[in-house]
Image (cartoon, helix red, strand yellow):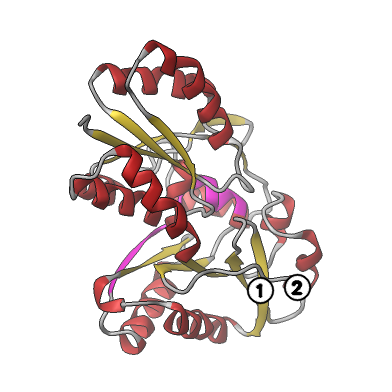
Amino acid sequence: MRPVKIVTDSCSDLAKDLREKFDIDYLPMNTVMHGKEQPASLDWESYSPSELYDTIRGGERVTTTQVPAAAFEEAFPQYLQDGFDVIYIACSGKCSGSVNTAQMVADSILPSFPGATIACIDSLNASLGEGLVAIKAAQLRDEGLDAATITETLLPLRNTVNMFVTVHNLNALKAAGRVKASSAFFGNLLGVKPIIISDVNGDNVAYKKVKGRYNSIVELVNLMADAIIEPEKQCIYIGHSDCLEEAKELEALLKERIPEADTYVGYIGPIIGASIGADALAIFAFGEHVERFSV
């Protein structure tokens, strides 16, 4: 059996400590800020989190690109030459075309590597929801499963990733085309904080509205408490776009409400951050099967 390499991309928001812990590689996308295109490093090598989010707070839009085809063309053959099968866990195809690019590259190079596998999996999620799928793939690999069995196991699990997000408004998400336009109207009412989920098809959907920032944080906790399954076996991942103190407050509320679960706090990375805007809070864990919600 060939060993398996798990690969993801900048949308996974997996910080270096998580990538090292679970032995996961990633391929960077790019951001365009102040007219300059730079790699969307999850280690913040191009710019600091505050530089990115202060730019967004100042009203300047930061745009993004998908993983370049050249990155897949370089990485995939090297993994195969080193004897690995590859499982690429991609951002939701509703948010990025990277999974399609990866599949085209895989189809073009696999004939040169008989017996090798490259599985390109649409995670149906983004941020640490995508990261959760990649971590699960790594855990299955470490249990000794092969690429085909890992892929077969992951596919139904994608819709059990529960994501709950609150933002100050939907301006950035609407501008980036990352949330249903029909749902965007209520996000900018005075004091109203939208709650966003990822639905069964991988769309970001404005699910409900809550009055006030603190109440929106409490609602994230309530939603996760209702959705999570076997919390004693899980880590709830908390992402924030440059609002660490509120992320710690959210963590404390989660520990109080769901004490059995571990927690992890990290930054929402450059790609998702450019889309979701500054001061967002998000939580992710496996739980109830996600259904499509209409607003």
Q: Nearer the viewer, residue 102 or 154?
A: 154
Query: Residue 227: x, y in percent?
Result: 46, 79
Looking at the picture, which amino acid does disc 2 mark?
Val
Looking at the picture, which amino acid does disc 1 mark?
Tyr
Q: Which residue is mark 2?
A: 295
- Asked if the residue under mark 1 is in contact with the one under mark 2, i.e. CB atoms within 8 Å, the reply is yes
Image quarter in which the N terminus is found: top left
**Mark 2 crowd level (few <14, some 14–19, many ≥20, 10 Å Cα):** few
Query: Residue 133: x, y in percent?
Result: 39, 53
Query: Residue 129: x, y in percent?
Result: 45, 58
Q: Would residue 175 be found to the left or right of residue 86 on screen?
A: right
**Mark 1 crowd level (few <14, some 14–19, many ≥20, 10 Å Cα):** some
Answer with the quarter of the image where residue 193 lies. bottom right
Element marked by disc 2: loop
Q: Nearer the viewer, residue 3 or 7?
A: 3
Q: Which residue is mark 1?
A: 207
Question: Magenta region: which residues?
Answer: 262-275
Q: Is residue 251 magenta?
A: no
* Numbered tag placed on residue 116 in the rendering: none
Q: Separation of disc 2 and disc 1 at Cα?
A: 6 Å
Q: Nearer the viewer, residue 292 or 13?
A: 292
Element marked by disc 1: strand
- Residue 214 visible to an observer of this rendering: yes
Which sits earlier in the primary sequence, circle 2 or circle 1?
A: 1
Q: Is residue 267 magenta?
A: yes
Vertical arrangement, residue 151 with respect to residue 1, above or below: below
